[in-house]
Image (tube, helix red, strand yellow):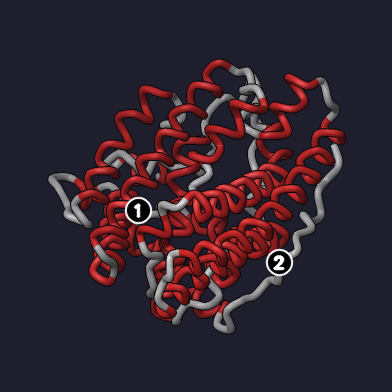
Amino acid sequence: MHSPMDVPLPFVCHTHPHVSLVEDRNLQWAQRMGLLPSQEVADRLSRSRLGEGACYVYSFAALPDLIVCAGWITWLLVVDDQNGEGLHSGPAEWAAARAPLERIVDSKGTIGPGDAEVPARRALADLCRRTFPYMSNAWHARFAASVRDMFDGYHQESIQRLAGIPATPEEYVAFRRRSGSVPYCIAVSEFAARSEVPDRVYRAPEFQDLLLAANDIICWSNDVFSAAKERARGDVSNYLAALVHHDGLTWEQAHTTVIDRITGRANDFLAKERELDLLLTDLDIPPEECDAVWANTAGMRDWMSGEVAWMKISDRYRTFEEVSETNPQPPSYVPDLLIAGSSQERSH
């Protein structure tokens, strides 16, 4: 299989000047939250360079806010690993694990009985308390909906993994738009910019089409970079795997096909930006609200280009444990962080 070196996109890549500081602060935060129960897990997070990734995708944020944004990315990928590779990859296991997380988001970070002993819940509550006070109730409602939608996508991926057969390409694109967490990430962009997209613009078809194009580009780019890892681990939830299984393509052909479709969606994004500009004029949106909209579309551009830049330097998709008949267990670098006490037990 061809090893991807890049996903060409027509968007300028930016980065924040304080990469080392953000990386260090993010690792310290993860340690305080209990997300790094062993040296192996800590080393993997360090090699993943999630703080540096945040500097790419939230390059415009003020430093204190950027550190919080790095936490949101870290928490997201921790939970993604719990569902994708950990002990919560089955539909029933995931259904039980998601409910307390949704409750914490809905309650804006309120800790319930036993939550403080569960690293993923404690980290989530901490991020909520450092983010939600600065955002409106309308933003919070959208963010909470994006979390539920993402978790629904995880559930669908769990079903596909259990079946061991990739979804059709059409089915895959539909549920990848949910599991890919892009609306969650772009909502965090609003916090990073400390400006919110007006609800009447956010709900408009022109804005939703723009967000959908960005969603596809971000998710499919990730599928290109993660395909080798997911193939080695027997994970069928990947766009390339769907094309290989259902359309009879080779992995090389599937890679080329997905790159071509990303290029097409990038052209769609540019066209939708022009349509959005016309909408803002037609709706007579005030200048300060227009600024908030364009700050968010700039955040989408940063995510599309920055994710690719991060994946090119991160170890996240390069080092992994392969699945075999003699090694069917979750990888040692994915401890259970969703159940009280389990991560500590596995680290000894």
Which residue is identified by label 2?
11
Is residue 289 at all visible to an observer of this figure?
A: yes
Spatial CA distance of label 2 from label 1 is 26 Å
Verify CB contact (< 8 Å) between mark 2 and mark 1: no
Q: Earlier in the sequence, mark 2 or mark 1?
A: 2
Residue 74 is left or right of residue 272, and the answer is left
Coordinates of residue 22 in the picture (x, y in percent): 50, 75
Of residues 161 and 170, the one nearer the viewer is 170
Q: Check disc 1 and give the amino acid type.
A: Phe
The image shows residue 151 at horizontal and vertical percentages of 40, 38
Q: Secondary structure at mark 1?
A: helix
- Please name the residue shown 73% across and 39% down the image: 228
* The N terminus: image quadrant: top right
Circle 2 sits in a helix, a strand or a loop, which is it? loop
Q: x and y percent of residue 287 in the render?
A: 44, 79
* Residue 25 visible in the current orientation: no
For disc 1, the marked residue is: 143
Residue shown at 49% from the left, 39% from the top: 178
Q: Residue at x 58, y 69 (%)?
A: 52
